[in-house]
Image (cartoon, rainbow, N blue to C red):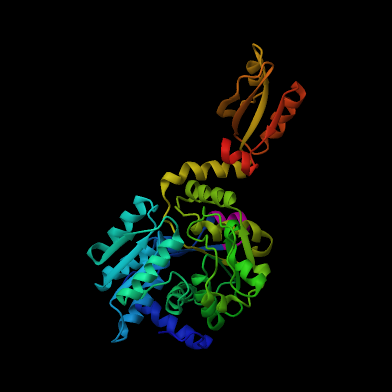
Amino acid sequence: MTDHSPSPAAFRERADAATAALRELFPPTPLGRNDHLSERFGADILLKREDLTPVRSYKLRGAFNAISRVMADAAGARRFVCASAGNHAQGVAYVCRHFGVEGVIFMPVTTPQQKIGKTEKFGGENVRIELTGDYFDQTLAAAQSYCREAGAHFLSPFDDADVIEGQASVAAEIVAELGEAPDMIVLPVGGGGLSAGVVSYLRAAGPGTDIRFVEPAGGASLAAALAAGAPVKLGRVDNFVDGAAVAQVGARTFEALKDTDPARVLAAPEDRICATIIEMLNVEGIVLEPAGALSVDALADLAGEIRGKRVVCVTSGGNFDFERLPEVKERALRFTGRKKYFILRLPQRPGALKDFLTLLGPGDDIARFEYLKKSARNFGSVLIGIETRQAGGFDHLFARMDAAGFAYQDITDDEVLAQFLI
């Protein structure tokens, strides 16, 4: 197994060897300039397309390195186990089939069939899937218990020295293709495996590179760990960015990241991430999962610092379930100010609704209309969703409603009411 704290030069040497070994599995992922983003931010923006690996995420790298390290040991296990409902499961399955070893993948019972099917396809006859537990903690406990009983090797998705070393191959490929380290690298953070690997590699290969880390606002576990001086478990996690919504960073990954300046850790709002997904899909034809869009999304926060610089954004995954597209579009519209929901107090008289409709502009469209209370004698409550063509259009609509004497309440950003009514 890998030494837990090799020197920067030794880590780089081992990561370079791991990168070379990966070539039997897939070629380096593309690293290319994105003209749209470069023009928008006045910088040389390059995308490291980890969404284009055989399993559409970088997780394949760590799984390959960890399994090959174990197999190199004559006494190493030949049965590998993981607990995952996403990219880690698919990476482990793919590598188990490649090496012809047995893989047992534990997934929550609630895992979508699409993810189960993809994992089965990547693993073929070498992988068995066990569905157990309603929540991931239950699934993880079952996987670790199985490992103890069966003498199998457990593969952590991030908190493993060999996995971290494998993820460092992302940085190795960037430096090799550019001939030098870039001015800045923007990394998505979940459990910290990718970030720990890249940071450790650049200590020797690019000590002058400015590294920025991006977490989903609803799962800022690295920021919490830096504030506490040790990994801490978040009390609540928003699972929308499922590839990076981790309640606690790993102990090994934090050891590599503990000296990070907290100001270099950014929190990306989930609704803004949705807008970024839609933009990259519509403008560039690039399909990114929420975690895969984190680094691109953070450019908005870095706009004042990156002008004229060469910046690499790691797009970490493209396993996007298109059944989620309506939700992503909805959240993107709300974030950009093009869609709002409000409760309208409508007089119970003939023509009242017509009076309201005359207030709508040519770019306003009713996306939702529902009576909430019809029993009142004088007024009724109506839930209305309005979508407008341009952000800022609601200022004019609400001004017309105020002038006409309509009473209303904007509930777009009210989490409690929105949860029950929208």
Relative vertical location of residue 233 with respect to residue 74 in this rendering, above or below: above
Q: Position of residue 263 (x, y in %)?
A: 68, 68
Q: Look at 58% across and 57% down and name the residue there.
A: 236
Which quadrant does the C terminus fall into? top right
Which residue sits at x=30%, y=79%?
77
Q: Residue at x 62, y 19 (%)?
A: 375
The residue lying toward the viewer, choosing from 383 and 150, is 150
Residue 29: % across, % down: 41, 66
Residue 308 appears anywhere in the view: no
Which residue is at the front of the view, 213 or 39? Answer: 213
Tell me where residue 332 sits by quadrant: top right
Magenta portion: prevailing SS class = helix
Q: Which quadrant of the structure image shows residue 99?
A: bottom left
Bounds of the magenta segment: 36-44
For residue 186: magenta? no
Q: Is residue 4 above or below residue 215?
A: below
Residue 39 within the magenta-colored segment of the rendering? yes
Image coords of residue 374 (percent x, y): 60, 20
